[in-house]
Image: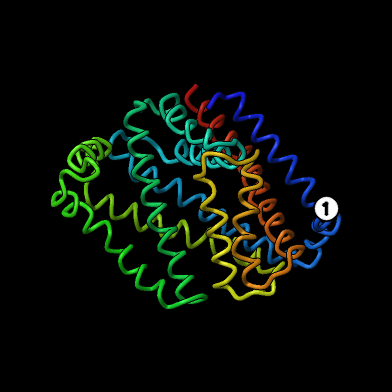
Amino acid sequence: MAKSVRWVLALSIFIILILVVEDQAGWQWVLAQWQTVHPLNIAILVLLTAMSYVTRAVRIFYYFASVKSSPFLPYLSISLLHNAWNNFLPMRLGEASFPIMMKKQLGFSYWQTSGGLFLIRLFDLHVLTSLFLLAASIAVSKFYFVLLIFWLLLPVIIKPLLLILPRIFFAVKLLSWLSKFKQPQVKTSQLTCCYLLTIFIWVFKLTAFTLIAMSFLPLTFGQTLLAVISADFTSVLPIHGLAGSGTFEGAMLAVLLPLGVDTRTALSAAVNLHIYLLIVSLVSVPLAIFIKNSRSIKLK
């Protein structure tokens, strides 16, 4: 898909969302819902979100520092900017910023950083899906707990399964291709630690986001968590509006409406959560730039 078409689609979805919110709920009413949230609660949840952002930086530092020794602060700056570009740019264009910044600031090759990022995204997918299935088993049906067990065991059984089925889905070539992404300097113990950090990242973030959403919804923590995770899953979609608009709200509504939440309330919760996400991401940008510039001054 041409870049110009992507941007036209992203802008169109963004405009449609603005019109739909005004028609179904009214922007003035939606934004007025923040008056019901105590400022201290917001401050605590922002701190919890910030903990998830710092833990993201610790994860990439722990993974890549074994390949090339570097101080922590550049990783923090890169992680904050990478997260912000992912949240603001459409069609996953923000992912490209990571290997570019790692190359420019720390001297890593594009292959090294792309491989590491791919592995980290697999960790994110596995943890996020596990938490979704756990929440679904609590809030919807125990059947999801069976799926959760299988999903948790998948990393252990996938390699033997592919070896047993070498002619299906090009399994041998797939294993060979995946093996290229793992840096030879990265040990299994480091990968285990990165996975555990991934769990902390998502627990911090989803707890904060769920509590924010619950400020606007008459639902339990587990039910709200399902909606929040559904919205987060949309970040991997190939098409969505500017700053993830449209699909983020749509995914939340897809969970909230069947749970009996009226359209106006569901739309308000989805939009306000998205606003919270974008504001926190926006605030992190000047901090990342300050860290980057202060490091440049020290080097001079």
Q: Residue furthest top?
A: 300
The residue at the far left in this view is 164
Rendered location of residue 178, percent (x, y) = 25, 40
Q: Residue at x 63, y 63 (%)?
A: 44
Q: Is residue 282 left or right of residue 162?
A: right
Q: Nearer the viewer, residue 65 or 207?
A: 207
In-image side of 172 versus 130 (left or right): left
User: Residue pushed farthest front?
Assistant: 168
Give residue 124's position: percent from left, percent from top: 41, 52
On the picture, is 23 further left or further right than 81?
right
What secondary structure is marked by label 1?
Answer: helix
Location of mark 1 (residue): 23
Q: Badge 1: few (under 14), some or many (20 or more) residues near its Cα, within 10 Å?
A: few
Task: Check the image and report above or below for 160 versus 107.
Answer: below
Quadrant of res 12: top right
Q: Amino acid at mark 1?
A: Asp
Residue 240 image point, x, y percent = 60, 41
Residue pictured at 28% horizontal, 59% vertical: 154
Against 62, is 30 above or below? below
Q: Position of residue 85 (x, y in %)?
A: 57, 37
